[in-house]
Amino acid sequence: MASIPRVPQVRIPATYMRGGTSKGVFFRLQDLPERCRQPGPARDQLFQRVIGSPDPYAAQIDGMGGATSSTSKCVILSRSSRPGHDVDYLYGQVAIDKDFVDWSGNCGNLSTAAGAFAIHAGLIDPARVPQDGTCTVRIWQANIGKTIIAHVPVSGGQVQETGDFELDGVTFPAAEIVLEFIAPAEEGDDDGGAMFPTGKLVDELQVPGIGTLKATLINAGIPTVFVNAADIGRTGTELREAINGDAQALARFEAIRVAGALRMGLIKTPEEAATRQHTPKVAFVAPPRDHVAASGKTIAAGDVDLLVRALSMGKLHHAMMGTASVAIATAAAVPGTLVNLAAGGGERAAVPKSIVFGHPSGTLRVGAEARLVDGRWTVAKAQMSRSARILMEGWVRVPGDSF
């Protein structure tokens, strides 16, 4: 019997970080194996092996992934040559049980960690990092061609990671990082064009097997399809277990997502949706009501402006995706959208026009500056607070013949 050639593992400098309610493996572009420094199969295969995918058991035991969409992620950062930016940030959403890495969108939660990692990894000019105070990191989000500004706290010349800022969906407090998403729905986006790709605040969306649903289709932060919870037999108070264990419910949400993607022009045929799992997101909204979050904490109707639940990579998210939070903030600021109507309708007085929404893990405050210009809605920026910290750093190891 012929012996099987034994290929040693290679080790690659990497940092395992939490950002917001997600976590992923972070790399500097210069540290990747040379053949993985460019987009292509080698890079995808490397990231899949790092995370432990594709895994028919959907457990990612043989990798760094955590078997959820929130924990199956890789990030690459490099110094930016783009004027007015410090770093380029590229994000890969690694499918858990399928042979696929989705590069079609951003991760808003890991955008927080991208700002902190840029400082940790020496990608920011040391002269711009204060001894104590706040370092402003100007990030070019390469997946979607957008600017993100991270205001990262610094103590003793290093990123401050500990603090008393609490984020529902994250067990322990940490230091607050403020994120600004600049022009997240700027005219001329590659994906879907204008903020409202169909030109309507509310569409009549034909969904095979379900019927016609009212939907707000928005491209801000990330392309998102919003529907009313009541229209699909939901309350907006659901926790993960109520959705993710119901195969029929998940299939209906995927049908809504596919119909929305087609209407937004993100795909040309339903079959293309299988190769674009990360975008668009699908979310359902409802007016406030008393309910209990996943932590057991009671959320009173008066604590929030509306309720939102969203799906990521085919499953209900345990909290809320950062990019979807941008979409929520933006849609809430535009009178007449389903999100705005669920929050009571009309214009909000404050600038940025902030709301507090309820999600499965608790609540989150977000804000957006939206305005009507020449008959079209635009948004200057959206803002939210998150936190980030390093969980582990050193080297990640993968078999040398895996990429």
Image (cartoon, rainbow, N blue to C red):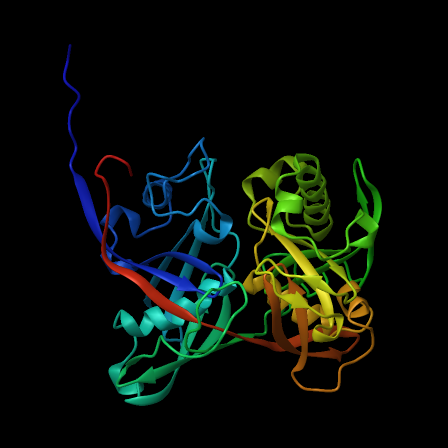
Q: Say which of 133 and 326 sits in front.
A: 133
Is residue 344 placed above or below 271 in the rendered structure? below
Percent coordinates x, y for residue 355 in the rendering: 68, 76
Q: Is 92 on the left or on the right of 188, as rendered?
A: left
Residue 280 visible in the picture:
no
Q: Quadrant of the C terminus?
A: top left
Vertically, is 283 above or below 297? above
Q: Nearer the viewer, residue 298 or 257?
A: 298
Residue shown at 75% from the left, 75% from the top: 302
Q: Nearer the viewer, residue 201 or 134?
A: 134
Instruction: Measuring from the top left, give residue 28's x and y in whole percent.
Output: 29, 61
Taking the spot 63% from the left edge, 61% from the top edge, the residue there is 293
Measuring 47% from the left and 42% from the top, which residue is drawn there?
A: 95
- Decide: is 356 above or below 32: below
Quadrant the N terminus occupies:
top left
| Image-quadrant location for residue 4 | top left
Residue 10 placement: quadrant: top left
Would residue 26 appear left or right of 110 to someone viewing this image? left
Name the residue nearer the viewer: 284 or 187.
284
